[in-house]
Image (spheres, rainbow, N blue to C red):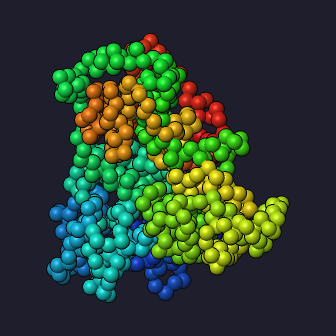
Amino acid sequence: MTKLTINNKPVDVAEGTTVLNAARSAGIEIPTLCEHPHLTPYGGCRLCLVDVEGARTLQPSCTLPVTEGMVVKTDTDKVLAARKFVLTLIFSERNHFCPFCQVSGGDCELQNAAYREGMTHWPLQPNWQPFPVDASHPYIVMENNRCILCRRCVRACGELVGNFTLGFEERGARSLLVADLGVPLGSSSCISCGSCVQVCPTGALIDRWSAYRGKETQVEKTQSVCTGCSIGCGIDVLVRDNNLVRIEGNWDAELNEGVLCKIGRFEPLAEDRNRLLTPQVRKDGKLKAATWEEAFEMIQSKFSPLVGKKGDGVAALVSSGLPLESLNAFKKLYSDYFQSGMVTTTEEGEYTAAASAFARSTGKSFEGSLADVQKADLAIVFGVDLVKEHEVIGFFIKRNIPNGTKLVVVDPATNTLDLLADVTLKSGKSVEANLVHGITAAVISAGAAKNTDIRVSEAHLKTAILESGVSNNELSKVVDLIKSADNCILVYGKGISDEALKQIVHLAEVTQAKVIGTRGGANSLAASQLGLDSRIKLNGHQAVFAAFGNEDPSQYLIQQLEKAPFLVVQAAYGSALTARADVVLPSFTCLEQDGTFVNFEGKIQQSKKSMTAPEGTKSDHEILTSLAGLFGQKLDTDWKKSITANPAPVTIQG
C-alpha cells in the first residue's frame, strides 16, 4: 500500500493507483472530461490538474501514479484558475450552443463541469467556424461542432470493441473526428455497437432516438439483462412516461462490462413493427378483433379432441427468447398434458442439440465461460461469424488482437473474421470432423500436446492429417500457434455435427484449451435442458400453437406452418404468420415482463420489467397458464428442477 495526503486527508491505496482514483477512494471529487473508468488514461483535457507538493507545474491526476508520502491539493486558487481556463479554451474552440444541444440540461459533462466552476457565459468568444455534421448512419449522428477532442470515442472503439473505426484527421483546432479514412459514418466499417455514443461526454455523438426525450434526471432507469442473444449482457433501460428513451450498457455488469452490440442497444429503439393490442379470431375467412374469452373458447374447442394424440394432435413451437417460466409452462402444457408429438423451439436445437447430446453421453459439463474468452491468447473459431452474431464474444477477441492474441478461423464459408485471422482453414461445406481431427493429430505428431496422457499410433496420426482436407503447411501454422499459447479457446457455433463437436472437445483435451459454445436465443440453453431442441416436422398435425414473443418469424418458419389446419400464434407484434393464423394472442415484450434467463455459460439471470404493457395484452406466462386452466391443469412451476435434471454443456449456476 502507498500512503499519501490529499487535501490534508491521509489516504492509503494500492501501488500504481492514479491520484485521480486515490482521491475518489477518499470521497474527493476531481473533475474530468477525457477520463473514463473503462478506458486507458489519456490525459488530454487537462481538467483534472492538481497541485502536487514539490512539482514544478500542475499535474494531470488521471495519469499520475501515487508515490509514498505524496502531498496533493485539489482545490487551491491555482488549480481552480487552471480549471476555469481549460474550460474557457474548450468552449471557445467549437460551437457549443448549450441551449440548442440535445444533451444540454444534465446529460452533458462539459456543461456540468462549467456550472460546477461557476461559469455562466463564454469568457472567450468561439471562433464560429462551422464543422460538418454526419447524419448518414442509421443509428448515430456525428456532430463535430460539439466535439471536445477528448478521444473517448476513439479509445472505446478500439479498446472496448476492437473495431478501430474512429480516428482524427488534421491537427490542433482543425482536428476532426472521422470514420476510417474520412468516409461517411454510415458507409464505414462501423458495426453500430454504440459504445462511442455511450462514452461521449458531450453531444458530439448521439443516437437518433433519445435526443430531447428525457434527461438523466427525468427518466426511470431499470437494471436488467439483454435478451437479444444468449450472452445475457447487463443493460440499463431508460424510460420516460412509459416510452423507451434509450438502452445503455451497464458498466458494472460482470459479463459485458458496459459493452453492447446493436441488437441490445439500438434495435429495440428502432422497432417499427405493428404492435398487437387485442386478441383476434378468424371468422368467415377474416381475422377480427375478439375478447380473450372468445379466443380461448375457440382454442379450447379445437384442442380438446386432440389431447393425448401423440402422432397428429397439437404441434407446438416456442421462441427461445421467452422467459424460463414461460418455457417451462409451455413444456408442461404441450409435452406432459397434450403429449404432443412435436414440441420444440423455433431454432430447432440448431445451436444446442449436439452439445446437449454430448453432455448427456459423458454425464458432465465441458464448456468454459466469457471470462476464458477475455484472457485468451489464442482463439480458434469453428463455423461462427462473431462479427455478425454473438458480437460481444467477438469484441472480447478482437480487442485483444493488438495485445498479441492470435486468431484461427475454421469455416468453409466467408467469415468476417477472416480479415483478422492469422490462419484461415477452408475445407468442405461445413466444419467437418476430419478437419478438427487432423488439427489434433498434427498437434500430437509435432509433440505440442499439453496432455501427455493421450496415446495414439503414428499410423493413425498420419492418416488423420492426410484426411483433414488442408495442407500440412496450414496445419503447421496452427500447431505453432497452439504451441506458443498459454490460454487457448475453441469457439463453435450453430449447425455443428455431433462428430465434429466430439473432435473439438478432444482437441481441447489435447491442448488443455477451453471450449466455448455460442447458443441461439436468450434462453437457448434452458430450452435445450427442457428437451425443446428437436426439428420441426409437421406430419398430419391437426393444430399448431406457436409462441413467438418479440421474435419475427423467418420465411422458413412461415413456410413450415402455412399449411397447418388450425394455427394459434402468440406474439407481441404482427407478422406474415399472424396474418395467416386462426387465433392471435397478443403478448408482452421482453421489456414489459419480469423473467428468468440462463445465458450461454449457465448463469441464471433476472430480466426486470421496465415498461408497462398496453391494455389488452397478457404476459407469455399468463397466457400459457390460462390455457392450461381451460383444460383443468395447474402447471408445475419448479423450472430449476427441470433444467438441472440432465447434465448440461456448462454448469448451471445462480
Tell me, yes or no, if residue 79 can be seen here. Answer: no
Q: Residue at x 19, y 26 (%)?
A: 285
- Against 38, residue 77 (above or below) is below
> On screen, 184 above or below 497?
below
Determine the residue positioned at 26% across, 74% down: 184
Q: How many marks?
A: 0
Q: Is residue 137 above or below residue 90?
A: above
The x and y percentages for residue 362 are 72, 44
In this rendered view, identify the residue nearer to me: 283 or 641: 283
Image coords of residue 101 (percent x, y):
20, 63
Residue sitting at x 64%, y 79%: 473
Where residue 206 sits, quadrant-wise, is bottom left
Residue 363 appears anywhere in the view: yes
Q: State which quadrant residue 69 falls in.
A: bottom right
Residue 602 position, x and y percent, is 58, 44
Q: Is residue 552 left or right of residue 12?
A: left
Q: Split into 4 quadrants, where in the image is the N terminus?
A: bottom right
Give residue 360's position: percent from left, percent from top: 67, 40
| Residue 548 to residue 232: above or below | above
Residue plotted at (56% across, 26% down): 638
